[in-house]
Image (spheres, helix red, strand yellow):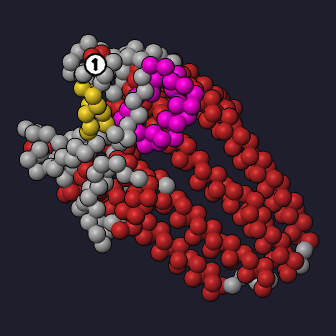
């Protein structure tokens, strides 16, 4: 397999090709865009095609022959297992390349993978591993070379590369000359909204900046894109609910009459249930998921850009989301104990989707630079000089 060394702007096509060409390329580097394209798009499409195709062929053969073809089911299971293992290897290699691109050395990554595999289900250690995984999500979202610097601490030296050994690529940095003769450094492929943003530009930036976590979106740019996205989400939710109700009603009806059927008719009824689940529920469900995941990622990106435009740094966002997740878990436990399972779940959901939504809306409605600081080296907030 070819060693993958990504830099600059990465298209979806290149990310797709790099995933397969770099199936065992653990020592190369993948950019932020290359990583998220690979991990969010390609494996889902492959699983949809392979798994959906195999299940469909199984049901067609079973309905045609009026019996379950055991040997074919075993072959299908082997094929699905091979596909799953192949994608897992490629995803792990992609993880290594992205972490090396932000500045990690390969030895601590190997140790972390071993610890995760061996101790994930140990009660307390498993909780710690999941907390660290949240931080790793942040690490996977930062720009190239984010952790590269001269560290004095020995443990930090063990984790991260130094500037002497890390090769930086500046091919995304370009100089833009303004009409008044001043110069401005621009990062290609990054959404940087300023001033008035039209509805057309907001929608364009939403989809064009699907993986642009490092730019900025104005208040108008964010909410104008939501005018399009929120109705799409409502329609999709309605379709999913309708498919779910139809599928479960059909299954319930068939199950009520199955005790009165003979063996042959019972097998036919079972195959009919599988056919309904695949064609009416599972098939459209996978298709909708395949279409909505890119929109969900783009929505996450524009929210990150909006919060950065308010003045928050990326680490501040993850700290806030982590605190909200912990509070939600505590509230869920309190409501479930105090009100019982069904009523407690209802109150917990109202809290999670109500209070969390209000908090996020408040932050998303703040004007540009509202939370920026005058401090030159603030850890949590952007500097006002950049606004």
Q: Position of residue 105 (x, y in %)?
A: 19, 53
Picture quadrant where residue 336 is located: top right
> Looking at the image, is 366 positioned above or below residue 47?
above
* Residue 220: in magenta span: yes
* Residue 243: in magenta span: no
Can residue 385 be seen at all in this image of the molecule? yes
Q: Position of residue 99 (x, y in %)?
A: 28, 51
Q: Residue at image x 58%, y 63%?
A: 48
Can residue 115 be seen at all in this image of the molecule? no
Question: Which residue is situated farthest in the right direction here?
Answer: 260
Q: Residue at image x 31%, y 22%?
A: 179
Q: Which residues are magenta?
A: 195-222
- Give whichever of 324, 230 is nearer the camera: 230
> Looking at the image, is 46 positioned above or below residue 112?
below
Q: Residue at image x 68%, y 76%?
A: 57
Q: Position of residue 387 (x, y in %)?
A: 33, 18
Q: Which residue is mark 1?
A: 180
Which secondary structure lies at badge 1? loop
State left or right for residue 36 relative to residue 385.
Answer: right
């Amino acid at each position: 397999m070819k060693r993958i060394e990504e830099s600059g702007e990465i298209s979806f096509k290149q990310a797709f090709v790099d995933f397969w060409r770099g199936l065992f390329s653990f020592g190369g580097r993948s950019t932020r865009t290359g990583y998220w394209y690979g991990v969010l798009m390609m494996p889902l499409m492959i699983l949809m095609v392979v798994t959906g195709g195999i299940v469909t062929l199984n049901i067609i053969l079973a309905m045609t022959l009026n019996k379950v073809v055991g040997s074919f089911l075993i072959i299908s299971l082997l094929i699905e297992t091979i596909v799953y293992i192949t994608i897992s290897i490629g995803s792990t290699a992609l993880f290594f390349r992205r972490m090396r691109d932000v500045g990690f050395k390969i030895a601590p990554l190997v140790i972390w993978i071993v610890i995760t595999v061996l101790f994930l289900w140990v009660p307390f250690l498993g909780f710690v591993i999941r907390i660290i995984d949240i931080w790793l999500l942040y690490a996977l979202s930062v720009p190239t070379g984010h952790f590269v610097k001269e560290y004095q601490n020995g443990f930090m030296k063990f984790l991260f590369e130094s500037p002497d050994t890390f090769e930086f690529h500046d091919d995304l940095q370009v100089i833009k000359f303004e009409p008044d003769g001043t110069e401005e450094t621009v990062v290609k492929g990054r959404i940087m909204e300023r001033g008035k943003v039209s509805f057309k530009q907001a929608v364009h930036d939403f989809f064009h900046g699907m993986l642009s976590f490092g730019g900025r979106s104005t208040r108008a740019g964010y909410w104008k894109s939501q005018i399009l996205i929120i109705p799409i989400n409502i329609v999709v939710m309605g379709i999913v609910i309708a498919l779910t109700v139809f599928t479960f009603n059909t299954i319930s009806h068939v199950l009520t009459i199955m005790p009165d059927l003979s063996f042959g008719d019972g097998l036919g009824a079972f195959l009919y249930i599988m056919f309904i689940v695949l064609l009416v529920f599972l098939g459209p469900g996978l298709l909708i998921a395949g279409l909505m995941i890119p929109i969900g990622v783009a929505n996450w990106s524009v929210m990150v850009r909006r919060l950065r435009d308010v003045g928050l740094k990326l680490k501040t966002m993850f700290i806030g989301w982590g605190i909200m997740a912990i509070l939600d878990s505590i509230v869920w436990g309190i409501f479930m104990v105090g009100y019982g399972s069904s009523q407690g779940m209802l109150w917990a959901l109202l809290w999670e989707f109500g209070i969390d939504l209000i908090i996020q809306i408040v932050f998303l409605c703040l004007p540009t630079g509202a939370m920026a600081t005058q401090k030159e080296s603030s850890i949590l907030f952007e500097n006002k000089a950049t606004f």
